[in-house]
Amino acid sequence: MAKFLTVDQIDDSWVATDIATLLFVLRGDEVLLIRKKRGLGAGKINGPGGKLEPGETPRQCALREVREELCISVLETTACGELRFQFTDDYSIHVHVFISTVYEGEPTETDEAIPLWFRREDIPYTEMWADDRIWLPRVLDGAVVSGKFIFSKDVMLAHEVHFD
């Protein structure tokens, strides 16, 4: 039986296996997403980001990951929330979410990701993690999110989301 069955179990004593980031770059009415080529969520569309390296802050990680995945330099970021994901196989990840409208360079495909611009109303939620449709539209509108999610592989079993 799975150790985590309810979001209430993701409390102050909960410690994630990994700490990671997502950074959504906005250009007018468009958002820059990626099709992941490898790692957790390979094949899915998501925001660029990844796991913190030793000594990095979440912001530093977000900037590095966008450089590595898309070959662009983000110049300013706004922190817009934290998401806690618990998987029934005991893997867990604590994700810091950022948005930016200021960057240099042209998003370029790499070994990790294919860059994709979408108008906000055309974001392909059916090709993304199930939780994205719950919180991403509000974050793109300027809200700050705090979320807890339980997944069994790709299936979301439970969630709790709050916005400021």
Image (tube, rainbow, N blue to C red):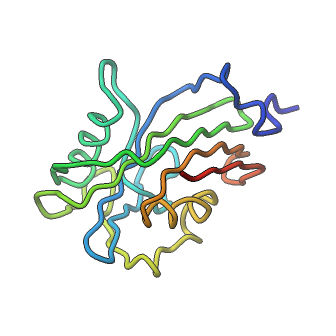
Rendered position, 148 above or below 70? above
Residue 130 in the image: state x and y as whole percent: 63, 60
Q: Residue 20, located in which quarter of the rendered image? A: top left
Report the residue at 44% width, 40% height from top. Answer: 96
Residue 13 in the image: state x and y as whole percent: 67, 19
Q: Would residue 159 appear left or right of 62 to someone viewing this image?
A: right
The N terminus, quarter of image: top right
Q: Nearer the viewer, residue 101 or 144?
A: 144
Point out the residue furthest to the right here.
1
Q: Residue 133, located in which quarter of the rendered image? A: bottom right
Q: Would residue 29 appear left or right of 134 to someone viewing this image?
A: left
Point out the residue furthest to the left here.
105
Q: Would residue 110 appear left or right of 21 to someone viewing this image?
A: left
Report the residue at 25% width, 70% height from top. Answer: 27
Rendered position, 164 above or below 96? below
Report the residue at 47% width, 74% height from top. Answer: 123
Rendered position, 89 above or below 77? above
Residue 57 in the image: state x and y as whole percent: 32, 28
Point out the residue furthest to the front here.
164
Q: Nearer the viewer, residue 45 or 98?
A: 98
Residue 115 in the image: state x and y as whole percent: 30, 64
Report the residue at 32% width, 48% height from top. Answer: 78
Count of all numbered marks drawn on residues in the image: 0
